[in-house]
Amino acid sequence: MQNIGLVSGAVQLIVSLVLGLVVAIVAFRSFTRMHRELDEMEALRENNVAMAIVLASMVIGTGLVVVQALGPAVSTMQTTLYNGITFLTGLAFVGMTLGFLLLAMFIAIVGIGVATKVFLWLTDEIDEMAEVKKNNIAVAITLASVIILMSMFLAQGSQTFLTSLVPYPAIESIQVMGK
């Protein structure tokens, strides 16, 4: 029993380290693809703090959602370890874990992207992206707060959804003796 906790803890630590880096890169690149009208790298080179705030919120927001996938992934790993691991069950575990993490990243990026676009569309009095490009920090903080808020809502929903996909072992029926 204690070995299972040790193994799952070590695997979770390694996955977390790798996942953090992957999420940061994918979130950053996804934002640049969603907003092609901006040159984020040039803005960062020019010390555009507004752009840095918005990009940071995208990275943090995506991380908030994806980190929720670790719980279901660890539950799947522990279930696999308790049931005994073979090559095929190990392969199935790796596939499910990657699936959980990719699905969480997809939910985060698409959800944040759609929410941001809707927010930008609903606030037609101001062109937020043009203002961010001009280093308007007030607009960047507002936009960043929308991104983080959406991430917080998406995180809980994605965790509930992913937890429902964990293959828990069937509980045997219990028979009451004596009646």
Image: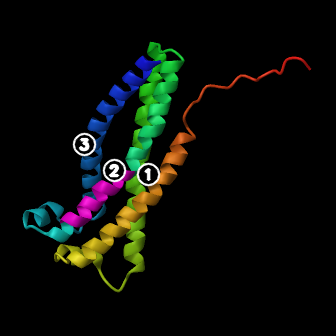
Q: CA distance from mark 3 to mark 1?
A: 18 Å
Q: CA distance from mark 2 to mark 1?
A: 11 Å
Query: For residue 111, which quarter of the picture?
Result: bottom left
Do callouts 2 and 1 mark residues in contact (Cβ within 8 Å)? no
Q: Position of residue 164 (x, y in %)?
A: 57, 41
| Magenta span contains residue 56 | yes
Q: Which residue is mark 2?
A: 63
Q: Secondary structure at mark 3?
A: helix
Quadrant position of residue 140:
bottom left
Q: Quadrant of the C terminus?
A: top right
Question: Can you give x and y, in whole percent of width and height, for residue 110 in the image?
Answer: 41, 56
Earlier-in-chain disc, 2 versus 1: 2
Q: Earlier in the sequence, mark 3 or mark 1?
A: 3
Residue type pointed to by label 1: Ile
Picture residue at 24% right of the left edge, 61% below the top: 55
Where residue 114 sits, quadrant-wise, is bottom left
Nearer the observer, 34 or 19: 19
Q: Give the number of the disc on residue 41.
A: none
Look at the image and give the residue range highlighted in magenta. 52-64
SS majority, magenta:
helix
Residue situated in front as seen by the camera: 51 or 39 = 51
Q: Image check: 94 left or right of 49?
A: right
Q: Is residue 111 magenta?
A: no
Residue position marked by numbered label 3 in the rendering: 21
The residue lying toward the viewer, choosing from 106 and 166, is 166
Q: Residue at x 77, y 23 (%)?
A: 174
Give the amino acid type for the residue marked by disc 3 in the picture: Leu
- Give the structural element (helix, strand or loop) at label 2: helix
The secondary structure type at the circle numbered 1 is: helix
